Image (cartoon, grey):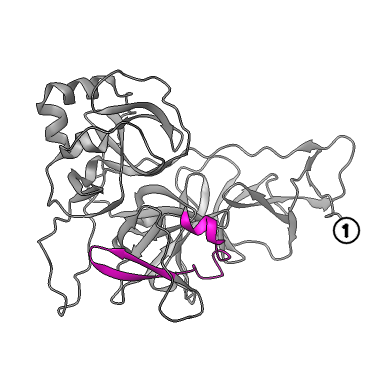
Amino acid sequence: MTAEAEALALRAGMRCYLLPARSRRLEAPPAPRPLPGAPPGLLGLAMVERRGAMVWALTPFPSAWVVVERDGGAVICGGDAVAEPTPDAVPLDLPDVAPLPMPAPVPLAIPPLPAAVPLAAPRSRDHYLLTHGTGSVSVPLAALEGMGSLRPGMDPAAPPGLPGAFGIHEVAGRRVLVLDPAWCTGGRLGTGMASGLVALLRIDGRLLAMPIGRAAPGMEGPVLEERLRETPDGRALLDAAPHALPAAAPEAGREVARLLLCEAGGTRFAVAAAEIATVLAPLRPAPAPAPVPSLRGVVSHRGEVLPVHDLDPRLAAPLAAAALAQAPLLRLALARPVVVPVERVLGLRALPAALIEAVADDALVSGLAPLDGMGIRICRASALPA
């Protein structure tokens, strides 16, 4: 029989805080890097157990530290002493950290393919090509909010009764109008909406989503914005889409880091967007020709056969076969083609590069970034495959 985990509390001044399950003592005090504009009590961002974590002080001069596990990551809290819970202990409730202002999107730097592989067509660095079936459309990078997913059986919250849309749904916590990809690409309108990967779009202050099979830098297809703005059906769709919050204005002269935020093994991590060649919708890998450790099979993309490798075990355990078939795939921008699965693609994020804490002497993690109120590891694409 497994022994129950020890219940812990953190004393801070005259109060005793009951800690969530899986909390544990931290013997060595953290060395946080301060964050500009942080609320009172937030000391900054630190590395703990190969993960980034926000560091909170519940007293002016903490002498005892604990690691508290939360959804998507961990935080470090400091107080006067770690003790057993008392009858007057209250649950620990840390404030949510407001997200940093999001600068306007910047062009992705796409590494060139090896000289031996000819490019099929020139690619634009400020547009993304969204593909569904045999049709494609191009959208400016500035209009691409990120990626999300539609769950099986989702019903529209408010069908607009318009050709070219499936209805208004909640995707990644936001209400969006889901477009029929056939309308976007000029094909025959669909009769139903399938679950899977969608691109989240902000066009003329409205939030929309388009189901996709893959997304990659390029502008070989028709421009979706023009179809929405210049046709009667398109203007009606824009009018029916939910309003988006105003985007933050860019700060002149400030270098911006652009990251793709993902989740694997219940923990979030990020990869530099320039190190991701393509995000692919879930595909069931075909068996590999020869058994290789960590190789889960192969998938086909644009006429190429790509190996699918598990993520590095420091990030997540290998996915079960059923979960692998439902996992979005990241094609990494490496000299050797390779694809890795993740549990979720949470979208693109941008933040001032000065806020990233560089991590030295770590083959997997290149830095820590304060994103969505947590300390997120930035992983090197070259180290993601197991």
Residue at the (24%, 19%) spot, across then down? 239
Residue 207 makes an appearance in the image:
yes
Question: Residue at position x 57%, y 58% from top?
Answer: 265
User: Residue 106 versus residue 183: which sits nearer the camera?
Assistant: 183
Residue numbers of the magenta segment = 297-325
- x and y percentages locating residue 26 in the rendered image: 72, 61
Q: Please tell me whether residue 235 is drawn above or below residue 263 in the rendered image.
A: above
x and y, in percent, of residue 349 in the image: 37, 48
Residue 384 x %, y %: 44, 69
Image quarter in which the N terminus is found: bottom right
72 vs 68, left or right, is left
Quadrant position of residue 195: top left
* Of the pair 164 and 137, the residue shown nearer to us: 164
Q: Position of residue 301 (x, y in %)?
A: 28, 63
Measuring 46% from the left and 42% from the top, which residue is drawn there? 37
Q: Look at the picture and state if 112 lies above or below 97.
A: below
Q: Is residue 13 visible?
A: no
Specify few, some or many for label 1: CA neighbours under 10 Å numbering under 14, 14-19, or 20 or more.
few
Residue corresponding to mark 1: 3
Q: Is residue 50 above or below residue 58?
A: below
